[in-house]
Image (cartoon, rainbow, N blue to C red):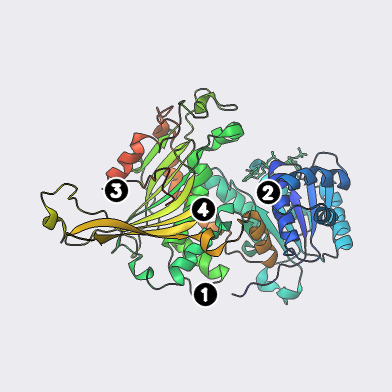
């Protein structure tokens, strides 16, 4: 699919005075504007309850753009700010939509945006359904159902971006999907996952499907296990009040890491098009085994960081955290994909706060050669051990890159050592890192859903993690791992039960 140009529209951001808008959405849009990548005719209308004029709002955003945008210039900001508008309204009140509609018209008329509208839900998740209902009642969504549109391309569109978290469990996610479905078609719903904006996740598709050397090995016959890790060095910082109701499983695994898993495990799509890619990802999610409550304890490990040197202080002592909290700051689970490609290959997903390193990576460990030719040769000599299996590491952040470990002969007597082929993404291709939100916003404006989640993916991911939400699995986890470590001992045990071990790189190792 050739990328189409992003279309002019009014971007209506609900939650305009909030953290996400000022720290991510506006700086990312401004950077795109500075690069000349935003569509001509783009207008931004911020909506929240705080009373502000357009100018107050622009002034409020300016300081954040200066701090968080990578290409801030006074002149650029002055031009960009003219495209920003504000509407003080309670978006959970249907009556407020008279004013919101009129401000959409005002912004559109001044910026020549036409009638396309891109809604962005950047408010607390408990407000999502109410606001969607109000949008539905307002009559702003006119697109109609695809099957009855005569000339769809000529009609204006209305789309909606929904922030994470998408539900707190399967039931709430289904309810939110139903609310969205009453107002919008699936192809107009953009469930955002900013992880998927990361370059290297997209590079995963290229690595797998633009090369022939990996794909023949990318299956149960050659791969022993797959590990997906997202580790943070910091604790929960100021997010204690939010985090204590979410936990690592909901915050990271159900959302981001399940998406990475789908990209690693999916079949090749027929075309590089959003519908094809999403269809393949859904098939993977459909094949993830839902474990029984009896199996769950053997397939997970939870932890909560305690106090320790150099750490942020025990999780339970953090601001906004209940003193007897059993919320996990570390989670590791084993999933199995019951299809022909992956049957029997464990997928381990792990995430944690206050860990040894900041790191997001995918590690594929290959099976050992069927016969060990070389260990008998060095028998009796020191360091004569069976060599480790081949390993492919895909670093998503930081130090984006790929490395492949294999064995080579040391010159002289027969001795074998590991060798690493290492590809550093920035060193090879250069370029500055781009905030993930920008490209995702452009995708929504051009109607490309490749990097957004389909309703079935979200519900499939929730089904897979539901057995691990049982509070009983978190009993006694308080302080069970020190800050700066790779998590609790139970996490190592989880892999050991399958004859595997985590890849825990040392400080010096990039990959
Ligand atoms: N912050 C992040 O880095 C981040 C990252 C990923 C996902 N998210 C998600 O993004 C969403 C927003 O997060 P946030 O951190 O920006 O929250 P936040 O700072 O609390 O902002 C919430 C915004 O909602 C507005 N609001 C509340 N009630 C409203 C109503 N009835 N009508 C209209 N506006 C209303 C608030 O402004 P008023 O009080 O003026 O109305 C405020 O602007 C959440 O779902 C969060 O989970 C945030």
- Label 1 and label 4: CA atoms lie apart by 25 Å
Tag 4 secondary structure: helix
Q: Residues within 10 Å of mark 3 (few under 14, many from 20)?
A: some
Cα distance in 3D space between marks 2 and 4: 27 Å
Which residue corresponds to mark 4?
A: 459
Judge depth for marks 2 and 4 and give the one in front: 2
Whether residue 108 is situated above or below residue 243 in the rendered picture: below
Q: Earlier in the sequence, mark 3 or mark 2?
A: 2
Q: How many angstroms separate mark 1 from mark 2 (CA)? A: 32 Å
- Is residue 268 visible in the rendered structure shown here? no
Please name the residue that numbered disc 2 is placed on.
24
Horizontal side, residue 464 vs residue 413: left or right: right
In 3D space, how far apart are the residues under numbered discs 4 and 3 (Cα atoms)?
A: 29 Å
Up-down: is 146 above or below 471? Answer: below
Mark found first going from the N terminus, 1 or 3: 1
| Disc 2 within 8 angstroms of ligand 1 (CB) | yes
Name which of mark 1 and mark 2 comes first in the sequence: 2
The x and y percentages for residue 174 are: 56, 50
Quadrant of res 92: top right
Residue 421 quadrant:
bottom left
* Between 292 and 488, the one nearer to me in the picture: 488
User: For mark 1, what is the residue?
Assistant: 271
Q: Secondary structure at mark 2?
A: helix
Which residue occupies the foreground of this view, 451 or 409? 409
Task: Give the quadrant of ligand 1.
Answer: top right
Question: Which numbered disc, 4 or 3, marks the residue closer to the eye?
Answer: 3
The residue shown at (32%, 58%) is 419
């Amino acid at each position: 699919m050739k990328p189409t140009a992003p279309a002019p529209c009014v971007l209506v951001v609900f939650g305009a005075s909030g953290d996400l808008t000022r720290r991510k959405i506006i700086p990312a849009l401004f950077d795109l504007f500075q690069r000349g990548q935003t569509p001509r005719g783009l207008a931004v209308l911020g909506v929240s309850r705080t009373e502000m004029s357009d100018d107050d709002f622009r002034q409020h955003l300016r300081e954040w753009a200066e701090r968080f945008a990578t290409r801030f210039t006074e002149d650029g900001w002055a031009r960009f700010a003219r495209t920003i508008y504000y509407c003080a309204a309670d978006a959970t009140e249907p009556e407020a939509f008279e004013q919101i509609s009129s401000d959409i018209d005002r912004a559109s008329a001044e910026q020549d945006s036409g009638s396309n509208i891109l809604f962005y839900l950047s408010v607390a998740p408990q407000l999502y359904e109410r606001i969607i209902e109000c949008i539905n009642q307002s009559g702003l969504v006119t697109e109609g159902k695809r099957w009855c549109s005569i000339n769809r391309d000529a009609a204006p569109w209305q789309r909606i971006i929904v922030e994470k978290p998408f539900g707190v469990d399967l039931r709430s996610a289904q309810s939110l999907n139903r609310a969205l479905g009453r107002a919008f078609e699936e192809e107009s719903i953009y469930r955002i996952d900013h992880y998927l904006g990361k370059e290297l996740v997209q590079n995963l598709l290229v690595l797998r499907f633009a090369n022939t050397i990996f794909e023949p090995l990318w299956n149960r016959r050659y791969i022993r296990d797959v590990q997906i890790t997202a580790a943070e060095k910091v604790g929960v910082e100021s997010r204690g009040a939010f985090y204590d109701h979410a936990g690592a499983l909901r915050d990271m695994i159900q959302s981001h890491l399940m998406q990475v898993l789908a990209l690693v495990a999916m079949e090749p799509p027929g075309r590089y098009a959003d519908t094809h890619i999403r269809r393949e990802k859904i098939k993977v999610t459909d094949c993830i085994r839902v474990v029984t409550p009896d199996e769950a304890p053997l397939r997970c490990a939870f932890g909560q960081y305690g106090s320790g040197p150099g750490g942020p202080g025990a999780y339970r002592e953090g601001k906004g955290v209940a003193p007897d909290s059993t919320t996990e700051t570390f989670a590791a689970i084993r999933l199995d994909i019951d299809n022909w490609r992956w049957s029997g290959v464990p997928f381990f997903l792990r995430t944690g706060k206050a860990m040894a390193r900041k790191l997001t990576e995918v590690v594929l460990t290959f099976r050992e050669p069927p016969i060990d030719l070389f260990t008998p040769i060095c028998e009796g000599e020191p360091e004569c051990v069976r060599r480790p299996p081949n390993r492919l590491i895909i670093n998503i952040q930081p130090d984006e890159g790929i490395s492949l470990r294999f064995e080579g002969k040391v010159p002289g007597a027969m001795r074998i050592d590991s060798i690493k082929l290492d590809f550093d993404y920035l060193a090879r291709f250069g370029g500055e890192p781009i905030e993930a939100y920008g490209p995702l916003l452009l995708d929504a404006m051009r109607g490309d859903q490749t990097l957004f989640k389909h309703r079935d993916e979200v519900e499939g991911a929730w089904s897979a993690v539901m057995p691990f939400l049982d509070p009983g699995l978190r009993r006694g986890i308080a302080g069970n791992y020190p800050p700066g470590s790779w998590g609790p001992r139970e996490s190592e045990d989880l892999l050991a039960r399958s004859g595997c071990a985590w890849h825990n790189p040392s400080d010096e190792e990039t990959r």
